[in-house]
Amino acid sequence: MFQHYDRFSLQLILIVGAICEVFSACPAGFVFLSSTGKCYFMNTKTLNWFDAERYCNTIGSHLTTVLSSSEEVSIYDYILSPRGYSYNQVWVGLNDISNVGTWIWIDSSPVSYINWAAGQPNNEVQNCGALYKVITFAWYHMPCSELKISVCKYTGSSFVASEGKMYNRHFH
Ligand SMILES: [Ca+2]
């Protein structure tokens, strides 16, 4: 099909195609953050931690990890604040459910960046982690049964093919 285009047009087509590819990296409903190169989904329905994670799973993701200060700030600035949720407690994938006292990310990412609020985690009956902007972005551990909004993070691509939700389906 390309024989009908001159060299410049062909390059333009390839460039536009590449740009579409970049912006198509997120499944429907997710927001792309250029600071991390990942896709995020804010679930405004308040759910307990387990149901929040289960919901993320249904859209091919997990509760979000927060792997750096810049990712944390970006989640607030570009996912939560624009939607009016900047001061709520928000479930993330942090938990010590399987081994109390050992905090892990639900998607098995290493816990390298840590931002517990002063005094957190402070007892053994709260096994799930939330962001809490009132305390300058810090992390709180909370009872998993509490109902909160949540943020899912999409890191893979395998589920998308079966779900057929990729934006790039519309570009090709
Ligand atoms: Ca706590």
Image (cartoon, rainbow, N blue to C red):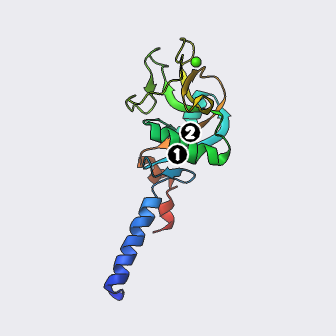
Front position in the image: 58 or 84: 84
- Decide if residue 122 is in sight here: yes
Q: Count all numbered tags in the image, as a single digit.
A: 2
Q: Name the residue located 45 percent from the left edge and 65 percent from the top edge.
A: 20
Mark 2 and mark 1 lie on one chain; the one further toward the N terminus is 1
- Ligand 1 placement by image quarter: top right
Q: Residue at x 34, y 83 (%)?
A: 8
The answer to whether the beta carbon of the residue marked 2 is less than 8 Å from any atom of ligand 1 is no
Q: Do the residues labelled 2 and 1 touch (CB within 8 Å)?
A: yes
Q: From the Cβ of disc 1, is ligand 1 less than 8 Å away?
A: no
Relative depth, front residue between 70 and 28: 70
How packed mark 1 is, by other alpha carbons closer than 10 Å (few <14, some 14-19, many 20 or more), is: many
In which quadrant will I find the N terminus? bottom left
Q: Is residue 172 above or below residue 148?
A: below
Q: Which amino acid does label 2 sit on?
A: Val
Is 165 drawn above or below residue 100 in the view shown?
below
Q: Is residue 105 left or right of residue 129?
A: left
**Label disc, if present, on residue 40 of the rendered structure:** 1
Residue in view at x 65 percent, y 34 percent: 88
- Eyeballing the image, is 88 above or below 159? above
Q: What element carries label 2?
A: strand
Horizontal and vertical percent position of residue 57: 52, 38
Is residue 113 left or right of 41 when viewed as pictured? left
State the residue position of label 2: 151
Does dot 1 land on a helix, a strand or a loop? strand
